[in-house]
Image: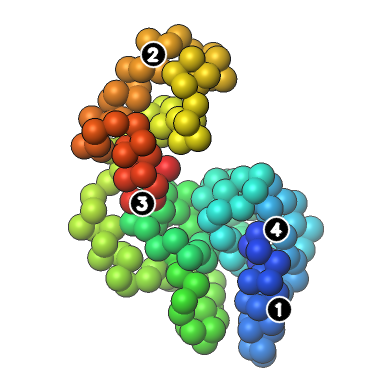
Amino acid sequence: MIRILLAEDQAMVRGAIGALLELEDDLEVVAEVGRGDEVLQAARSSRADVALLDIEMPGMDGLDAAAVLHRELPGCVVLILTTFGRPGFLRRAMQAGAAGFLVKDKPAGELAAAIRRALAGDRVIDASLAAAALTEGPNPLSSRERELLGAAADGSTVADIAGQLVLSEGTVRNYLSAAIRKIGARNRVEAVHTAREKGWL
């Protein structure tokens, strides 16, 4: 029996995915969580073989949770299951040690097959997304540029961001300017929008 941890912040979606997986003779959902920062403990206590992680969750996003799981419980195979099929997310998932990246609009049978394949050691990636990631190229932003652009996403001023991250205002401006230039945007708002669309934030 393949033991599965399901991490999804929307209870109805989580319940539906769990119910579909339970229809398979060899799959058992042994833990369900709605927050990314609950994933590691749940995986440990349930001794899950596979963790299915959504990307957008409170506490910690699924990509960061995947990296923690890969580091702390390397025997637990991680699959990202998301609505957001963005090339940048795929690249980040692979860097985090995920064995697969799937979008939620696939049939349940494909998800079950993907779980089995990933547990057998295969990389399981949505084909159209893989092609888009190759075309798109890597994320041009450094981790610091991503951090500051993310901090600016809610409309925070340079002074707000500087105070929050304990940096000088000049340093914040320099990083934001570099991020805007790399993305090819006209301003911060456009840079945030583009970076989110491509999965770079």
Q: Which amino acid, by three-letter code, is at mark 3? A: Glu
The quarter of the picture where the N terminus appears is bottom right
Q: Nearer the viewer, residue 70 or 147?
A: 147
The answer for how far apart the CA atoms under marks 3 and 1 are is 34 Å
Instruction: Give the amino acid type for the residue marked by disc 2 in the picture.
Output: Thr
Q: Position of residue 87 (x, y in %)?
A: 33, 56
Residue density around tag 3, few if under 14, some if 14–19, many if 20 or more, within 10 Å:
some
**Disc 4 or disc 1, which is closer to the eye?**
4
Which residue sits at x=37%, y=71%?
126
Q: Label 2, label 1: how many angstroms apart (C-alpha)?
A: 50 Å
Between the residue at mark 2 and the residue at mark 4, the CA separation in whole angstroms equals 36 Å
Label 3 sits on residue:
197
Name the element at disc 2. helix
CB atoms of marks 2 and 1 within 8 Å: no
Which sits earlier in the primary sequence, circle 3 or circle 1?
Answer: 1
Mark 3 or mark 1, whichever is nearer to me: 3
Q: Residue at 39% across / 13% down in the picture?
A: 171
Distance from the alpha carbon under mark 3 to that under mark 4:
24 Å
